[in-house]
């Protein structure tokens, strides 16, 4: 199972340590390919990216990768322009992938860690 962990409000030192730990685990032969981490500067930044419509889009793309944004908009019953904007934002944040084959979300789980 691949998982995506979102971090919000974390200091740079923690992100750097996470990278070092992953490198050390990889050198020992442990699997680090199945985990992805995306760090947002703040909770507000994370919340701005993960609107309810975008979470719905993520869920749909996970279950049904789409060849084009137009296909995705039709499947969701939403306006093409809005879906394209959402895809652009989610791709820029590293939450979905756009390739020549289409739009994909190749992880099974999203976890969120919010620093207090």
Image: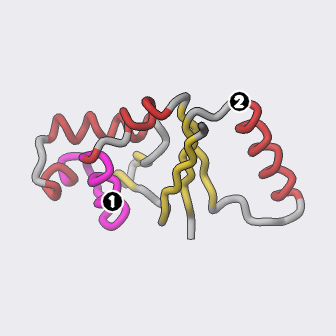
Snapshot colouring: secondary structure
* Chain-order first, disc 1 or disc 2: 2
Which of 64 and 12 lies nearest the eye of the viewer?
12
User: In which quadrant of the rendered image does the C terminus lie?
Assistant: top right
Name the element at disc 1: helix
As for residue 68 lying within the magenta part, the answer is yes
Q: Which residue is mark 1?
A: 59
Which of 12 and 29 lies nearest the eye of the viewer?
12
Which of 59 and 74 lies nearest the eye of the viewer?
59
88 relative position to 79: left or right = right
Nearer the observer: mark 1 or 2; the answer is 2
Distance between mark 1 and mark 2 Cα atoms: 29 Å
35 relative position to 51: left or right = right
Q: Which residue is mark 2?
A: 12
Residue 75: give its label. Answer: none
Return the x and y of residue 109 as percentages of the image width and height: 49, 63
As for residue 28 lying within the magenta part, the answer is no
101 relative position to 39: left or right = left
Return the x and y of residue 74 as percentages of the image width and height: 13, 53
Return the x and y of residue 80 as percentages of the image width and height: 15, 41
Q: Residue at x 64, y 35 (%)?
A: 10
Return the x and y of residue 21 as percentages of the image width and height: 81, 50
110 relative position to 20: left or right = left
């Amino acid at each position: 199972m691949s998982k995506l962990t979102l971090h919000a409000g974390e200091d740079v030192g923690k992100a750097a340590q996470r990278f070092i730990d992953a490198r050390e685990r990889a050198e020992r032969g442990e699997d680090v390919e199945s985990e992805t981490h995306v760090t947002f500067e703040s909770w507000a930044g994370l919340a701005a990216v993960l609107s309810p419509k975008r979470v719905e889009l993520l869920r749909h793309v996970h279950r049904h990768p789409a060849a084009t944004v137009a296909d995705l908009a039709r499947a969701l019953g939403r306006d093409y322009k809005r879906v394209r904007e959402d895809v652009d934002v989610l791709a820029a944040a590293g939450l979905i992938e756009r390739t020549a084959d289409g739009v994909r979300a190749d992880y099974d789980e999203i976890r969120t860690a919010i620093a207090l």
